[in-house]
Image (tube, rainbow, N blue to C red):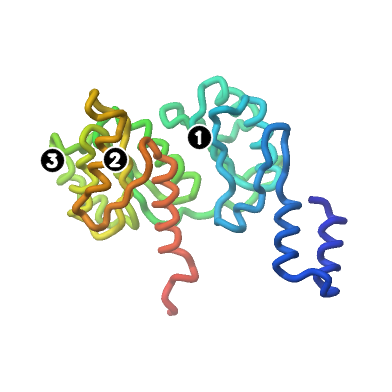
Amino acid sequence: MNESQLLQLARQLSAGELSSAAFLDALTALQSSGTSDAVVDLDRARRCGFPEVVYAPGKSSAAIVEICHRLQAARQSILVTRLVPDQATLLVQNFPHGIWQERARTFRASASKVGSTEVEVEALRGYVPVISAGTSDLPVAEEACETLAWMQVRTTIFPDLGVAGPHRLQQRLPEVRTADAIVVVAGMEGALPSVVGGHVSCPVIAVPTSVGYGASLGGIAALLGMLNSCAANVTVVNIDAGFKAGFVAGLIARQRHSDENQPPR
């Protein structure tokens, strides 16, 4: 989008030649920034509260870097998911202030530095702990944590609290009962979200993982177990979908702590 195009739209709106809805549609079209491989939705932050997230599979390393440059040029934060090391290496070279989390397979960079210009960093808002049933579930749990960090939501990971050792969860309950929402990641039979849900008063976002032996069917057993949870505060995302769980939980936390939702003093 350039200045002359924006001025022309503003004049048309002022003269009554464009309705408000048509003006917004035209603005959205101008803000879509194309690359050789993708059309970057630079208006998503306005519509949905957060910038577009880059899903790495199927994209070349160069294409991912190009997309991220478009996002940062528009002063939007960057989150890339499901990266392989070669893709991540090029991102780190181009965005040295970013964070590559190898186990989560994510890369994130804030909009706080654009060239030499400093942009105010938003304070953390809300609290979403991430609980993993076992060590094997940690890659998915870390993806949820990195998503929450990108959303500027306070988070803590609690690893290895699965139902095989129920005392471990009991010991950590005081630390999670103050949460706005909780992400629970589990494979095998997927029982942990129901147990957590029976102890807390906030939403529990359950993530089935593909961890388990043959009868786990690549996470389908855990998915079906979570969908059939008796705990009324448990909802479920897709298999291995750490990003989706983190994003939904982050939205819940941020909306609970948004300024407009605060009671008058």
User: Quick one: quadrant of the C terminus?
Assistant: bottom left
Q: Along the line of sight, which residue is nearer the eye, 254 or 237?
A: 237
Q: Nearer the viewer, residue 7 or 108?
A: 7
Q: Residue 116 occupies which quadrant of the picture? A: top right
Above or below, comparing residue 208 to residue 14 in the picture: above
Residue pictured at 39% horizontal, 52% vertical: 249
Q: Tag 2, which secondary structure?
A: helix
Q: CA distance from mark 3 to mark 2?
A: 21 Å
Nearer the camera: disc 1 or disc 2:
2
Furthest-top residue in view? 86
| Label 1 sits on residue | 81
What is the spatial separation of the Cα atoms under label 3 and label 1, in whole angstroms? Answer: 32 Å
* Amino acid at pointer 3: Pro
Who is closer to the viewer here, 12 or 218?
Answer: 218
Question: Where is mark 3, residue-wise?
Answer: 166
Name the mark on residue 68. Answer: none
Marks 1/2: CA–CA distance? 22 Å
Residue 242: image location, x then y, percent: 40, 39
Residue 1 % position (x, y):
79, 50
Front residue of this view, candidates 62 and 93:
62
Name which residue lies at 56% across and 35% down.
98
Q: Classify residue 184 as left or right of residue 238.
A: left
* Label 1: which secondary element: strand
Choose top left, top right, bottom left or bottom right for residue 17. bottom right
Few, some or many residues within 10 Å of mark 1 (<14, 14–19, 20+): many
- Mark 2 surroundings: few (<14), some (14-19) or many (≥20) residues within 10 A: many
Q: Which residue lies under the disc numbered 2? A: 223
Q: Earlier in the sequence, mark 1 or mark 2?
A: 1
- Image mark count: 3
Type of residue at label 1? Thr
